[in-house]
């Protein structure tokens, strides 16, 4: 069994399918893990959901999933969800046939997945306090250090020690691909959000082979660039 990570998909089901083929990912044989932000903003969140189920993928909670969960819970309670941007309503409309089961699934997503070999998070951790004392907001939205709104500034992972366990994260499309290695060339930090939804690439990584695999986006990046993630 191989351990395969895929960066932020954002509804790009076509690219996700192409990447899974390029990775030779086999359901029931390989362990597929996602960095979060799988559904929102992009063209085909319903098909992404079908792919997640078909491949028995595990995932950490992303900031977009946190918002989507609040919206689905509002619908479940008979309330109108708070929708700020048109792409959020599009995602809700597309997921309507499976809203209940997706809501249940989202309610059980962890903020991080840790094994003896790696830690998987969506955005990152507090580099001073460590994994155990990272706040929910930091897990979901940290980019810079110190943690603040916006995308400009030193990254949290600039302060992450090579002596720590391999950390895999997403969320930071403006920062792009991040690969940091120890002197022995083993990786200790991997940032896999390479902006597929913005017309760049969708990235995957095979742990046992220390191999990065990317496919080119088929998206018009300007179409989906409606906001900067909080």
Image (tube, grey):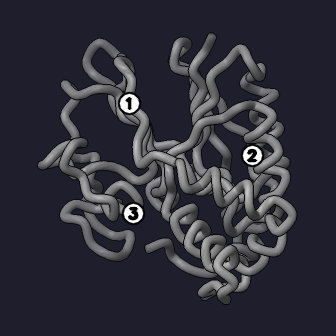
Q: Nearer the viewer, residue 193 or 2?
A: 2
Q: Residue at x 82, y 37 (%)?
A: 18
Disc 3: which residue:
141
Residue 35's place in the image compared with 218, above or below, is above
* Disc 1 + disc 3, Cβ < 8 Å: no
* Disc 2 + disc 1, Cβ < 8 Å: no
Residue 221: x %, y % from top left: 71, 68
Q: Residue at x 24, y 52 (%)?
A: 134
Disc 1: which residue:
114
Q: Quadrant of residue 181?
A: top left
Disc 2: which residue:
216
Instruction: Give the Cα distance between marks 3 and 2.
Output: 25 Å
Q: Quadrant of residue 23?
A: top right
Secondary-structure class at tag 2? strand
Residue 136's place in the image compared with 115, above or below, is below
Tell me which label, 2 or 1, sits earlier in the chain.
1
Residue 84: x %, y % from top left: 60, 88
Mark 2 or mark 1: which is in front? 1
Instruction: Tell which residue pokes out farthest to the front in this image.
Output: 77
Mark 3 or mark 2: which is in front? 3
Label 1: few (<14), some (14–19) or many (≥20) C-alpha neighbours in 10 Å: few
Q: Quadrant of residue 29?
A: top right
């Amino acid at each position: 069994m191989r351990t395969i990570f895929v960066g932020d998909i954002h509804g790009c089901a076509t690219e996700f399918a192409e990447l899974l083929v390029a990775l030779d990912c086999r359901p029931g044989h390989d362990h597929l893990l996602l960095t979060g932000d799988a559904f929102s903003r992009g063209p085909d969140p319903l098909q992404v959901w079908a792919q997640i189920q078909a491949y028995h993928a595990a995932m950490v909670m992303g900031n977009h999933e946190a918002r989507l969960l609040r919206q689905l819970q509002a619908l479940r309670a008979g309330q109108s969800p708070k929708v700020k941007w048109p792409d959020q309503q599009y995602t809700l409309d597309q997921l309507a046939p499976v809203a209940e089961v997706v809501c249940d699934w989202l309610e059980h997503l962890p903020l991080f997945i840790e094994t003896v070999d790696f830690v998987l998070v969506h955005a990152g951790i507090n580099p001073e306090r460590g994994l155990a004392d990272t706040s929910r907001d930091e897990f979901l939205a940290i980019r810079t250090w110190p943690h603040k709104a916006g995308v400009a500034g030193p990254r949290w992972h600039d302060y992450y020690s090579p002596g720590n366990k391999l950390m895999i994260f997403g969320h930071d499309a403006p920062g792009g691909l991040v690969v940091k290695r120890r002197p022995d060339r083993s990786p200790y930090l991997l940032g896999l959000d390479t902006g597929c939804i913005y017309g760049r690439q969708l990235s995957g990584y095979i742990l046992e082979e220390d191999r990065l695999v990317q496919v080119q986006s088929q998206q018009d990046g300007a179409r989906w660039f409606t906001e900067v993630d909080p």
